[in-house]
Amino acid sequence: MRLPTRRAWRRAALFGPLALLLALFLLTLPPAMPAPAMVKAAWRPTESWLYDRDGRLLESIRIDFTQRRLAWVPLDRMAPALPRAVIAAEDRRFATHGGVDWLALAGSIRDGLSGRRPRGASTITMQLAGFLAPELARPGARSLRQKARQMRAAMALERDWSKDDILEAYLNLAGFRGEAQGVMAASRQLFGKAPDRLSGDEALLLTALLPDPQAPPERVARRACAMKPADCPALTAIAARSLGTARRQRIDPGLAPHLARRLIDHAGMRVTTTLDGAIQRAAITALSRQLIGLGDQRARDGAVIVLDNATGDTLAYVGGVGGASTAAAVDGAGAPRQAGSTLKPFLYASAIERGYLTAGSILDDSPVQLDTASGLYVPQNYDRSFRGPVSARSALAASLNVPAVRTLLLVGVNAFRDRLWDLGYRGLTEDGDYYGFSLALGSAEVTLAEQANAFRALANAGRWSPARLRAEDRREASRPVISPAAAWITADILSDPGARAGTFGLDSALRLPFWAAVKTGTSKAMRDNWCVGFSSRYTVAVWVGNLEGDSMRAVSGTSGAAPVWREVMLELHRQAPPRPPRPADVETAVASPTGSSRRAPNISCAAPAQSARPARGPPARIASPVSGSIYALDPDIPGDRQRIRILVAGAVAGHRLVLDRRDIGPADAQPLVLPGPGAHRLQLRRPDGGVADQILFTVR
């Protein structure tokens, strides 16, 4: 075996240390450190926030449940006592070292060699490097190589970052207590205030949390007392109050959780709404008080919406108040529910607008039976009694069902359904025949938000525009839906306490010390109770019921939603609002169909009511057969003799009938021979090829 030569030894002595240094350099190479701007840009709060129109916090929504991070806080928005305390406790030579405190490191090594407990030598910059690159400070994996990489990363940070940037990032990335990461989350969660409002003692307690965020309050207080012994009693009391098990989570006031879930879909959003915080609180208080009074055996849920008539701004949006609710997460203000009698004002407005009725017209409140595709329809009044001849004013104000159905026969189911669609009831996606005569009694499902804005149109002389929820939403121009005269007369009826006295009494919750129009409604089997009304300034809509769909017990229109409506209206109107001005084409006429004269507002003959729709005649539609009809073929009758007659209504000139995509002739075609068994679609098409109406029927 040949021994190494002297030259080889000299070469090894020369290059060996260099190779060792290179290996150490590569082994301790730290990960790349980001720039301060990149760290701030990558910061993602775990929550989003909802504010009222004046910038006051209404609600926060937690999106990420791994940690709780709020907004990034600049150093100049923190109380000066906090960074001073952190530097004094964690890194006394922070202002002078270059990322590594070599004196503290030497002292730690000396303590270790002498058998004493070594002091911590990690600087603020080294800890920040661990936050930015978690592999540098992984618990349970501390090693000399890991420590060396962390030190080199800290020195790299000191070269590229300013001291203020380092301290700011450290305080925003540090963990403090529980899930709280960053000074904003810690300050809000523990003390209920922003970081710039922290006291000196509170800053000391936050600093004392840094070495062990989950330490018991007594141990945290001892650390804080060591930093400022003179304030020890106060520090101990604050620690017990803020860090104990009984501490409160004071992150937000929790005023609009349902609206927050509706408008917020990702973390970090800041949504400014049109809500007024004071009105929102008043609506919550009124609804909570009423539900407590009713008791959970009668009604568990409710919702309130308040609109500004002039602007369409939503001033209050209460989707529920929790309490005894078994479906507290469901938004009661946006959930479709049966409308009950709350749709009647728009039916009567349509009849008045078309000249079919006046407020003094007499309607027959007596038993009636109507043929429908599913059999006889026999409407009943709420109290199952009949009053005989009644005026339209009394019929609407007292919410009588049979006169409403008779009025629907005048207006037409499809025309009424179209009017409701124009008023924003977007849940009515079927044609009128689908709903039938029960549409007059509110068999369709609507939301409280739709109800509020539709009644707002009555308050605005028949003009409709979308309501606004966000401050950034554009205000759209209103469009006419109901004539001003018909809207005014309908509102006048709804504001008449004498006209509704027969059903509600003279001194019910519906009567206010100022002018207000209001309508209540109760759905089938007492599942929903509504009260929607308006003054010249505000519209208030209230729903009370059970979100799970079970019936209420002993709750009526005036004992369920009406007390909430009354309380909110009184809170809104500290001064009496003015009455709406009477339109020029409304006159007071004398009606005496039964021999007794009665003065009632009517649309002047000299200035007839103008429909909000263009003057184009009634819409073309298929009147018969009705959608859903079922026909049975008779085997004893020849097939070409089994026919049905097709009836159309409205302006159908130029229209054609199409059966299962096959043109069968003009709209006034001869009776149709029944097609073969199965489901069939019959369409009425306009001259341009568009579908004016269609029905489905079945042959067996």
Image: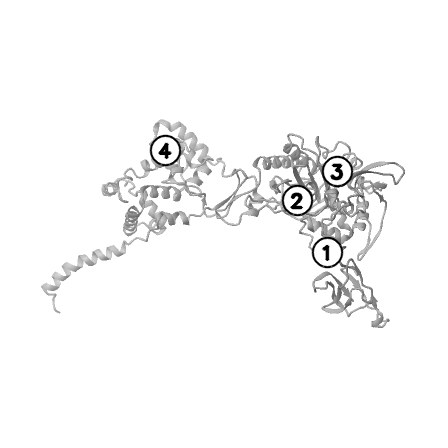
Q: Secondary structure at mark 2?
A: helix
- Nearer mark to the viewer, of 4 and 1: 1
**Relative image position of residue 30 (x, y in whole percent):** 30, 53
Earlier in the chain: of badge 2 and badge 4, it is 4
Q: Which mark is residue 431?
A: 1
47 with respect to 620 (left or right):
left
Q: Secondary structure at mark 3?
A: helix
Instruction: State if disc 1 and disc 4 touch (CB < 8 Å).
Output: no
Q: Earlier in the sequence, mark 2 or mark 1?
A: 1
Of the numbered discs 3 and 4, the one sitting upstream in the chain is 4
Q: Which residue type carries mark 4?
A: Ala
How far is disc 2 from disc 1 in space, using C-alphas?
22 Å
Q: CA distance from mark 2 to mark 4?
A: 57 Å
Helix, strand, or loop for circle 1?
loop
Q: Mark 3 and mark 4 in contact? Answer it, CB < 8 Å.
A: no
- Camera-side residue: 304 or 125? 304
Question: Which residue is labeled 3 in the image?
Answer: 492
Q: Position of residue 370 (x, y in %)?
A: 83, 52
Disc 2 residue crowd, few under 14, some 14–19, many 20+, Cα 10 Å: many
Can you identify the residue that label 2 sits on? 453
Give the alpha-carbon distance from disc 2 to disc 3, as whole Å. Answer: 18 Å
**Where's residue 521, x and y in %?**
73, 42
SS at circle 4: helix
